[in-house]
Image (cartoon, rainbow, N blue to C red):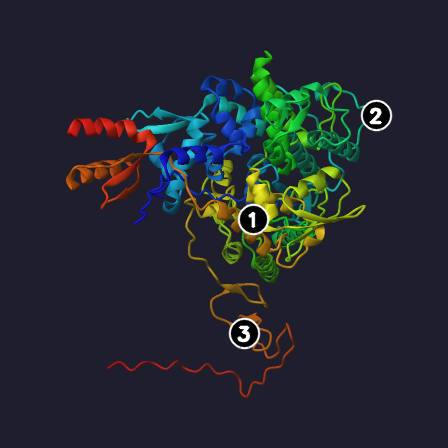
Amino acid sequence: MADNGLGSSNQESTLIRQNNLECKNLYDYLKTRPPNILEKLYNHPTICLAVYRELPELARQYVIRILFVDQPVPQAVVASWGSQAFSKEHVYVSKVLSELSVWQEATIPGGLLGWILSPTFKKNLKVALLGGGKAWSMSSALEADSKARDVTFLDAYSLERWECVLHYMVGSQQQEGISADAVRILLHAGLMKRDEDDGSPVITRQGFQFLLLDRQAQVWHFLLQYLDTVEERGLDLVECLTFLFQLSFSTLGKRKAGRFYPTRLALNITNSQNKNTPDIEEDTPKGYIVVETNYRVYAYTDSNLQVALIGLFTELMYRFPNLVVGVITRDSVRQALRGGITADQIIGYLKQHAHVQMLHAENRQPLPPTVVDQIKLWELERNRLTYNEGVLYSQFLSQADFNVLKEYAQTNGSLIWYNKERRTLVINKSAHDDVKKFLEEIF
Amino acid sequence: MNNIVLPSEKQPEITSTDETSLLVVILDSNPGQKMLRENPHVLTQCVDSVIAFANSHLMQKAQNKLAIMACHSKTSQFIYPGPSKPLDVRQVDGQYEAFTIVEKTTKHNLAKLLSSENSAVITESLLAGAIAMALCYIARIQRIKPPGAKLNCRILVVTGSGSSASQYMNYMNVFFTAQKQNVVIDVCALDQHLSLLQQGCDITNGLYLKVPQLQGLLQYLLWVFLPEPPIREKLVLPPPVKVDYRAACFCHRELIDIGFVCSVCLSIFCKFSPICTTCHTVFKVPAPLTVKPKKKKIKL
């Protein structure tokens, strides 16, 4: 640690952090919106419902408890609802609720501080739950469609369309059927970039990470990127979001206004937090990957896309018309890790696409624990060093000076490393100005 | 010598249960309940509260599941999802369509059930049977769920009828089945204290609440019964009270403190009988049973 020159550590840290796909959930997204936009958003029951579902579990209980209360509730009272052992969680939950402006601080006549739900949020959540207000869509005025689409058709259709986008990303043969808008978003999101030579889009590292996500997360990420571009194009963000959430809360395969039927891709798009829970309904695509304890991977597939994805972190051995056999090795995993893919993403992908036979195993774990652990260990191998940007202080004249500065940095929480004998210490770069000021004051 | 101090910016670990949760609500709709006989309008309020509560359950997570049963004097029925094919409901106001479907279906099926009832004879509600049906339903859902999925199941009984020892055996059977199936039974008593059902809550780790005021039913439901069992430990909820664990005798169905127990099948009787009525074991009685005077402690 001490040998690490400052310059190199700087470089390394940026090297490590770059190129990782940032997958925001709804909470992260809304947190960065200004309060007046949030207030506007809460005018729509759909958004209130989506935000409510995205809240942490404890927060959901708090909100429902004060949903029917008109006065502010003292903060001490709210704190007493949670048990002592989970007080940290209470603090976190209160922070989340404030950040999303779901509740606000208010003073109670006695001078105490209390929480009160944002009136718009409260009103519209009640509407979503109990009824009243305006209908979201015009569906009630429609007559039955003579050519109604059934659920299987819609599923097949949406699957085909989405695969089309993914195929386009890996540059498979079929290039047709993807709109210019979609390409623009892929480029905007950094999932693809223009090739330097001929200007045709090619996939980036983030693109590969994107491919490893589960479908719902993919759709959500794609939409977020789309929303980023919305404002540039002069569309109203609030309207777009409202429409998206209306769609996400509609019933599968039932005709909405005019001429469209929502497919499964659009439903519950915000639901990205429960990635690893298979839905009770039979809608998830069938798994095709078998992983054995000897690190062999058998993938029953003929899709080039899926083979390419598995090839990202396995060494492919054989290829048959309907089956690909590969083996997970240290080298193959390290290569994937170098490409910015994380161990969790690999494991997540294998888990998500595990073959039905793997799920029937007695221990109820879809993957052999040894393989999972080993992949994680291979990742940890690369993370033996932690990089911190710092400033080195040395050549103190006396031990006392050194001690004063060390104490100061320690109480500040900015001390990274120190050596008493050599009177050197490393201080967090962000605290450098503070410490310098302090030094000037005392010496 | 490498004493590295790392900035600790870790978020507190927030445990969340991402599992699907299935709630079966059993609503006692027997017109013979005392509170309904006094004021039939109470039922409307109860139904409204239960529907709002059920929708709040669905609101918690997109993947949550719900079933509502009506427990009647002669029959118990699923009213959501109903026996017939789902109603074609379209959104009429700002309510989420899925919630509208729950509300409409429940009211429609309940009205059908109530209008078919015409006898004036007051009989007790078949709660044990309803719980058994709910357990069967849960078992079926558990069986058809995809492998690897996790499903938390619980049953909430909302009833205003009194405790009846005549269903003692049935109650105990369903309680222990529920315990074995990891199904939590919660009971919300609207009118009278129910000692037998309270035992069931205790056995299955559920919550028991006797609602002090019927007007606030929805708030009581939301406060106490909405949190799923995994989050309950994080909240302060009514502490468990001393449970009355008296058993009912098999001969007269009365709750007793001390009684006779068959040495073969463990049936309980309040009076001695020479032949066990359950397993037909004949007890040898050497002499007419004489009650031995208890040994008195000699006071010094």
Dot 3 falls on a residue whose secondary structure is strand
**How many numbered marks does the figure carry?**
3
Dot 2 falls on a residue whose secondary structure is loop
Label number found at residue A147: 2
Label number found at residue B161: 1
Same chain under badges 2 and 1? The reply is no
Residue at 59 percent of width and 54 percent of height: A371
What residue did someone put label 3 on? Answer: B261
Query: Is A426 displayed left or right of A214 in the figure?
Result: left
Residue type at mark 1: give it.
Ser
Q: Is A436 above or below relative to B53? A: above
Count residues near mark 1 (Cα–Cα under 10 Å), then give few for <14, some for 14-19, many for 20+.
many
Q: Quadrant of residue A357?
A: bottom right
Tell me if I can see residue A443 in this picture: yes
Residue type at mark 2: give it.
Lys
Residue A214 rendering spot, x and y as whole percentages: 63, 38
Residue B100 rendering spot, x and y as whole percentages: 64, 30
Tell me if I can see residue B153 in this picture: no
Q: Nearer the viewer, residue A223 or B170?
A: A223
Residue at 53 percent of width and 23 percent of height: A124
Count residues near mark 3 (Cα–Cα under 10 Å), then give few for <14, some for 14-19, many for 20+.
some
Same chain under badges 3 and 1? The reply is yes
Q: Which quarter of the image is occupied by the N terminus of chain A?
A: top left
Q: Is A24 above or below relative to A198? A: below
Determine the chain carrying the residue at label 3. Answer: B
Marks 2 and 1 in Cβ contact (< 8 Å): no
* Comparing labels 3 and 1, the label whose residue is closer to the camera: 3
Q: Is A274 above or below relative to A37? A: below
Q: Is B250 above or below relative to A46? A: below
